Image (spheres, helix red, strand yellow):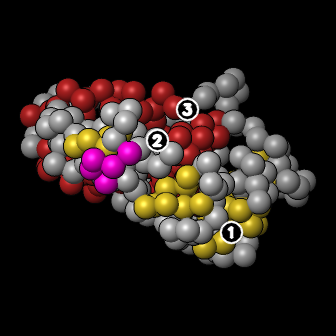
Amino acid sequence: MVKGRWEMTLLGAVVAALAGCGSDDAITESNIGDKLAQTFCAAEARCCQAQGAPLSPTNMQLCDELAPAVFIDPAPPPFHAGIGAACLRAAQDFQCLDRTSIDTLCRSVFQDLPGPGFDCASDADCAAPSGGYAACTSGGCRGFFAPEGAPCAGNAYSCAEGLTCVGAAAFVTGTCRKQSSAGGSCQYSYDCVYGTDCDFSAKVCAPWVKVGEPCGNVRCELGTYCNGTVCQANAAGSCTTT
């Protein structure tokens, strides 16, 4: 960790980190952890700042140290640079809400996952979807950020922006389709457009819950959290991510 990093202003730290995220440096086994910490923590700092509850320098440092822990590194690790690129893009889009889908995707950077086919020996053998990435896992090609109608790997970041992977459990092939707006069907939270969440009891997308309204099935709007009964405004100096 660079000495004096935490002496920068929060805004300066975010700008510097996002600039690094846009770098053309190749993603490798040795730098993916640092890249994830830089990208994810900058996104978290940005959305917390927007909520009026900025992260403290201590929490920024904790994020920097803990973010790479998501990676599972077996021996020998079957490193997938294509999934690593998808992981970083997902981290950059973090909105201080549920990060489960990001963690699930990033864990697969070092995992040998069940593949849908047997037509590749390495990531280089796979044709990436337009604007996306591809990876070879267990002899089968998987695309990330695929267009509408294309096969997908069953997670939030298999499909292009505004799309979701339907008809699939985690990492089982499905089809990319447009995310649902309020009242539309859903299976996971990422099936819903931004500003809505999947009400799992009804399997439909519903708007985020506002301050003072009952909470439980649907997440609270940005800058608030569920106190167990109703949505309540965040305390200053912290950022609630659930």
Residue neighbourhood size for the residue with mark 1, other residues' Cα within 10 Å, grouped as few (<14), some (14–19), many (≥20): many
Please tell me whether mark 3 sits on a helix, a strand or a loop. Answer: loop
In the rendered structure, find residue 238 and report the number of the disc placed on it. Answer: none
Residue 93, percent across and down? 41, 56
- Point out the stretch of residues depicted in magenta: 210-214
Residue at 9% of width from left, 43% of height from top? 9
Q: CA distance from mark 2 to mark 3?
A: 30 Å
Nearer to us of marks 3 and 1 is 1
Q: CA distance from mark 3 to mark 1?
A: 26 Å
Is residue 111 a member of the stretch shown in magenta?
no
Residue position for label 3 = 71
Q: CA distance from mark 1 to mark 2?
A: 29 Å
Residue at 39% of width from left, 27% of height from top? 66
Residue position for label 2 = 216
The amino acid at mark 3 is Phe
Q: Quadrant of the N terminus?
A: top left
Nearer to us of marks 1 and 2 is 2
Residue neighbourhood size for the residue with mark 2, other residues' Cα within 10 Å, grouped as few (<14), some (14–19), many (≥20): some
The amino acid at mark 1 is Cys
Residue neighbourhood size for the residue with mark 3, other residues' Cα within 10 Å, grouped as few (<14), some (14–19), many (≥20): some
Residue 107 seen from this side: yes
Residue at 22% of width from left, 43% of height from top? 233
Please tell me whether mark 1 sits on a helix, a strand or a loop. Answer: strand
Image-based side of 168 in relation to 118, left or right: left
Q: Quadrant of residue 58?
A: top left
Q: Quadrant of residue 50?
A: bottom left
Residue at 48% of width from left, 27% of height from top? 69
The amino acid at mark 2 is Gly
Quick one: label 1 or label 2, which is nearer the N terminus?
1
Is residue 52 placed above or below 132 in the rendered structure? Answer: above
Q: Nearer the viewer, residue 172 or 116?
A: 172
Quick one: label 2 or label 3, which is nearer the N terminus?
3
